[in-house]
Image: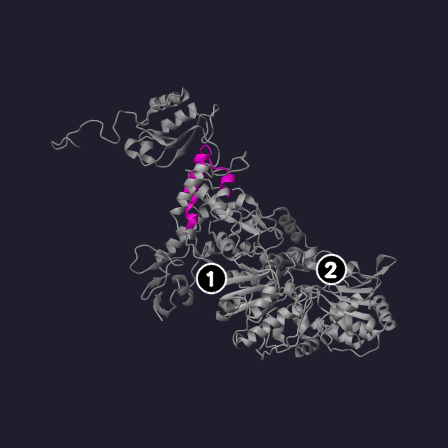
Amino acid sequence: MPKIVINGKEIEFENGMTVLQACELANVEIPRFCYHEKLSIAGNCRMCLVEMEKSAKPIASCAMPAAEGMNIKTNTEMVEKARKGVMEFLLANHPLDCPVCDQGGECDLQDQSLYYGFDKSRFSENKRAVQDKYMGPLIKTQMTRCIHCTRCVRFVEEVAGVEEIGAIGRGENMEITTYLEKSMDSELSANVIDLCPVGALTSKPYAFEARPWELKKTESIDVTDAVGSNIRVDTYGWEVKRILPRVNEDINEEWISDKTRYSCDGLLKQRLDTPYIKRSGKFIKTSWDEAISVLSEKINNLKPSEIAGHLGDMISIENTFAFKKFLESIKVSNFDFREKKFFINPGNKQNYIFNSSIQGIENADLILLVGCNPRHEATMVNARIRKSFLHNKTKIYSIGDPGDLTYDYTIIGNNTKIIKDIIEGKDNFTDKIKSAKNPMIIIGESALELSSGQFILSGFKNFLISNNLVKKDWNPLNILIQNASTVGALDLGFYSISNGENFTFFEKLKNKEFKLIYLLGSDNFDFKKNDEFIVYQGSHGDRGAEIADLILPSPAFTEQNGLFLNLEGRLQECRKASYPINDVKEDWKIFEMIILKNEQKKQFKNFNDLRDQAIQNLKNTSNIGELPNFTEFTKDNTNSTFLDEHVKIRDIDYYFSNSISRSSKTMSQCRDVRVKNLKEGTNN
Amino acid sequence: MSLKKVYENQPKDFVFTETNLKLAEEILKKYPNKNKKSAVMPFLYLAQKQNNNWIPLAAIKYIGKYLSMPYIRVYEIATFYSMYNLAPVGKNFFQVCTTSPCLLRGAAKIVEVCKNKISKKENEVSKDGLFSWMEVECLGACVNAPVIQINDDYFEDLDEKSTTKIIESLQNNKPLKPGSFRGRKNTAPEKSYKISGDQNA
């Protein structure tokens, strides 16, 4: 490995590194504004100037490739002077409004001017003023503060893939704006707020809410989709003030989607705070005692076959397990987690997870999307696919039309016929998959909802196994799960499948066999209510509570601890950041109350006991934060029905996909903007 | 020069005329297909020529679609270069050079004339619609300073008198010939100086 001397210390670096990266290896801190590891190099802020031997001028370390034998100095008078000079120029036009700026306390410019800047200003001329720009309901702009690092411009171009922010004008008159001040049409738009090193782009919903040092920070994970993005929940007392991304190179890198970030204001609204019971069409407040006795009386008067349970989209593994145990204690065997009738094959864990892993997308050389829209169903997965498309020129194909995905792809067919042809080797696409080194097939829930859902899943699986494409380090079969609770529910067996019949639960529901349906936080489960008695246990007064006859309030995901398996089958912990309001009881405790009412024994000693038992029931799961172990993958039997039908990708209402985001004011603003401003072709 | 403002009354549509469409196709041939974005500057120039010396937003969209590039990228370029006008200009568009050599030779006085005769502010079309003026950076004709570019022609070696004359001649629709206004041929010396006996200085 080549060597470089930094401040007299010789260190080894990898080829292709810049001087700045080499300095980081040597634990030498270089101040910077425009440089960002995940973005292309711009080299326009000049803050990273260092001295290089044999160079008369200081060099911009972020843009200078490190080379063998370079002698870099970062602690000389020249560097100090250069930094002070650059800082003075940056501050010449930067307003002194830190006391009213939302970036205060976490501002790169503030911190770096303290360490590297001048203590006085020599600039007595007028400062330049720039008009603020409209960038949609999420981003508040204060463009006078902008130092033109162009991080935001590079982010939307490279990562988000919607070229809508640009720098207009030039020189002193350069301004950052969206095209004609339209709002950005991206699910990743709010990441520019984190990227902005100054207070030019700040969060609109969080404006003037709190200072960073007043907030309690809890490291947690996101449950609004199945990706399990790593987040930090910032709370002030009970209120969740904001949600920020946490770096996890395996999942979300350092971005999160707008829904993850901004549905948190939905946690403050539409909350269920006390048990309610419906009497003559009206909800009446009631006590826990009464609610539980009404419920257990109902349960005792009904046959177990007349009772059903349904699991919602944001339920942790512990609560799923407790729910299942509770239902089994009253001998109920009809329960499911599916909101739509999609085919599942829970025999092997690899039948329902994203086997290639999210990080693995970067190694793929061919991606086939089968009936899925990753942009809306798993935004962070889509960002990875775009990264792979940009850096490795990965070829992307789709069956079914998902619309604009922010990268180029080819639609190879709209009907299931093409799938059959590929599997049977009649289409020339078969050879493309076979000749690819690391192919990926991503099957969406929409594809599994088709009548040939089983054919698609087992067909592709058998095809991959018989062509030796499933290796120990690479499994090309991927299922794109939409809900955070799904993989956990599948692991714990929270479904009703009788021999060969995948949709027993749905059949029974259709035949009106149920008299009592217990909904655990399920708001997206759309079914026609007849005269069933519906129990809704959850955090928000949403679709589930609307049709309920008895409401049992439970905390939201930020208010209780819980484990989740993300779509890769990675076990992660969602931590309690805030506490439950008012008279709310944790889900598993409610089940215990009902069980105790029926004079049975308590099932779990405490929460840790519950967690231990739940983890024991998970399939081949390793430690927290790690992927599941590889197990042998065998062929399915092939006699599944095939029907030539149109692959329709069910469009999900991105900003309104769960009960929290439906209660959020910010999300409904985003949705309004998207509905009103239909795109006019700025996509590539 | 401050940031260009987008004109309020925008035309709804813009398409290249048939002759310009042919020219555009010719321009595209100069670039490989994967780099067809490179044609954006000549395209903007064509659009400006076609639309009375200014570029409407419709043209920015049209060019963006034509070259399959995002609108903001076309818009960035149109705002970056001072040669692209984003609002209507007079029939005779005066670009007064005010960079150092011209300034030393009296460009400030010419700006005064423009202010008095054409419009008080830069980039303001005169009442009759015939004129508008703006200050520009070096036009590259420093030898003949001070210089004004009127539409495509250079008027050189000017002073207050000759500038007034030019404006009046254009008002009467009897335009004067471009070039030096002190009788110089191109950039040739005015008098024949003798330096160490030679005729050519």
| Mark 1 chain | A
Residue A192 placement (x, y as % from top left)? 54, 54
The quadrant of the image that shows the N terminus of chain A is bottom left
Numbered label attached to residue A540:
2
Residue A176 seen in the current view: no
Residue A554 placement (x, y as % from top left)? 74, 65
Residue A303 figure quarter: bottom right
The stretch in magenta equals: B35-61
Of residue A159 and residue A201, the one placed in the foreground of this image is A159
Secondary structure at numbered mark 1: loop
Q: Earlier in the sequence, mark 1 or mark 2?
A: 1
- Magenta-colored stretch includes residue B53: yes
Numbered label attached to residue A66:
none
- Check disc 1: other Cα within 10 Å, few if <14, some if 14-19, many if 20+: few
Q: Is residue B161 left or right of residue A289?
A: left
Numbered label attached to residue A393:
1
Q: What type is the residue that disc 1 sits on? A: Lys
Residue A369 placement (x, y as % from top left)? 57, 63
